[in-house]
Image (cartoon, coloured by chain):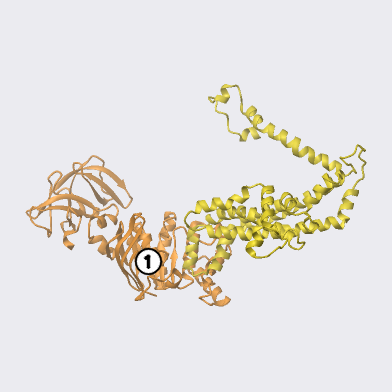
Amino acid sequence: MPSEVMIRLDPKSRAAAKGLNDLTIRNLFIIPTIVFLIVFNIFPLLYSLGYSFTDFRASTNAPANFVGLQNYRDLLNDPFIWKNFSITAKYVLISVTGQVIVGFGLAMLLNRSIPAKGLITTLMLLPMMLSMAVVGLFWKLLYDPNFGIINYFLGLGKFEWLADPDMALYAIAIVDIWMWAPFVMLLSLAGLSAVPKHLYEAAEIDRAGSFYTFFRITLPLVAPILMIAIIFRTMEAFKTFDLAYVLSSQPNTELIAIRLYKMAFQEWQTGMSSAFAYIVLIMVVAITNIYVKYLNKVKAR
Amino acid sequence: MADIALQGISKKFGPNTAMRNVDIDVKDGEFFVLLGQTGAGKTTTLRIIAGLEKPDAGTVMIEGQDATAWNAAERDVALVLQQYSLYPRLTVRGNLEFPLKSRTHNLTADEIKERVERAAETLQITPLLDRKVEKLSGGEMQRVSIGRAIVRKPRVFLMDEPLSALDANLRDVLRVELKKLHQELGATFVFVTHDQVEAMSMGDKIGVLDRGKLLQVGTPNDIYAKPINTFVARSVGTPPMNLIDGMIKAGTAVLDVGGHALPLANPVGSDGQKIRFGIRPEDVVIAADAPAEAKVFDIENHGVIKILTLDLGGVHVHATVSAQMKISIDDTVRFGWKPEKVLYFDPANGRNLALT
């Protein structure tokens, strides 16, 4: 089947002169990728599935004992794990909502003829290209209660953004919004500029108000691409680790990824953490599936 | 319903001038057609009437009021575009309801329903009401977009080449329907087209635009029989009017090519004056006793008529003759014209000498 789909190699090409045929070239490109995937992704995935049913600890030489579903049972009954989950859910909700509102708003502002539009767009995209750890470190400085510029400008005195148990999670979410709203903006901008101009003119002629036009024309046409942005950002926010880890280390900001890291590499509960990782994986896949279903529905409408 | 007047409208897009000092008067209830080539400024004119573009100079009057500063919503016009511009992801009903749902109307749900259904009936799209617009054919889409224009009962209908994207048969059908619709509604229509057949068959009045200038306004008959210059003369009629250079000599036309002398009825211009003679193909006579001789260069058989292309030594002249006429390419024929139908144009600037 695949060879029928493939375009035939031009017999006069250089590749053909070197004695390569379609099949060899295909293998040349595909096999390294497949080997890489198997060694670094699929093998660890399956191996850790095995571990998740044992009490294995990578820090000792003690042999692993098969414990069946005990790890899963313990994890799902652990109130502290549930706390991690609810913190994560709150974080995802705040962060993604914020990114969509800010990103889409910026896109609406940029989706008109303004001077230096290209330059502004490029500058807006910069945060997204920085490393998470770097962003975390300099926002830590910005948030600093003693010399941080944020307190200085807001006149908040020595307000402890990252140590305050009620504020810390929001503070991290704000950084995430700052960093990733441009991503939502970029996708929204692509969606917005694809809305035909004559539709807006028709709406103007039809005396539709700006809100009505936005909800009946703009939003339905941008919805599918916005949905894709939301899927990406939800998945990413769900596994946030570095940003939160660098910024704050207190129980109220302990996201599942941080809990998982601690369990695996500080407490060395390898078997237990494998089971935990699987629970997280299943959740992410489930959430993504819900979104994709919804996306298809939006597209079909 | 309303009358529209454009007074001294000019519009530039960067270095390109789209309209130069255009004056147009459209009377209440008139079907006014703007005819012109691509880039003549037809669409710009329409958009200025609609309020989607602001003129650089000049005034737009609607119902005797200065509407230049009004926006599209205030002008209460309906616009039908070539690309339909239906609202996607809505049903036909949703599209027809759209203009009625704005707060300026204040209609009850029943009133909206009634208006939508009446419009759908008029345009024979009732069975399509609950279909998504993406699933419609081109003709159905254009009907819906016309429907969306009529539900609101606007003062003026503006149509920008609404039939151009449709295939020939459908175009004929919708042309007749639009004309009927105009009679039923009694509203003012401004219709933009590059198709002279549409212009001639639909318009009460035709305005011919060329490169931003309004050349002539008149009834289809006026435009056809008394064109103001050679451009207007050639923009209506298929095949277009023949233009042959020559001069008036002792009350007859002596053509530059071949020196053929053809009779004239009431020559406009003095003896010896250079003239560009205009004659419609149907007014060219092929007969054994005709004064001039030419070779048949090409024959197009249209069933009812044949269109001959005659070669007068380098100059081609079209003639329409009965399809029954037995003739073949390279035959030598004798031809003349109906002297009372000849038009006289100034070879220098193309102006119709009888009208200046």
Quadrant of the rendered structure where residue B94 is? bottom right
Q: Colour of chain A?
A: yellow
* Position above or below: A82 against A50: below
Chain B on-screen colour? orange
From the viewer's perspective, is residue B70 above or below residue A121? below
The total number of labels drawn is 1
Judge from the rendering whether residue B128 lies leftward or rightward of residue A227; answer left or right: left
Residue B136 shown left or right of residue B31 in the figure: right
Quarter occupied by the N terminus of chain A: top right
- Picture coordinates of residue B116 (x, y %)? 53, 71
From this view, report whether residue B248 is shown above or below residue B99: above
Q: Is residue B107 left or right of residue B339?
A: right
Instruction: Give the amino acid at mark 1.
Output: Val
Q: Residue at x 59, y 59 (%)?
A: A104
Q: Residue at x 7, y 55 (%)?
A: B271
Residue positioned most to the front: A146
Q: In the rendered image, which residue does mark 1 sit on? A: B190
Closer to the camera in the image, A253 or A89 = A253
Q: Nearer the viewer, residue A55 or A227?
A: A55
SS label for mark 1:
strand
Quadrant into which the C terminus of chain A falls: bottom right
Is there any visible trace of residue B336 in the rendered image? yes
Q: Residue at x 43, y 62 (%)?
A: B174
One can see residue B123 in this view: no
**Viewer-side residue, B134 vs B333:** B134
Q: Is residue B135 left or right of residue A290?
A: left
For mark 1, does the 10 Å Cα neighbourhood hold few (<14), some (14 to 19), or many (20 or more) residues? many
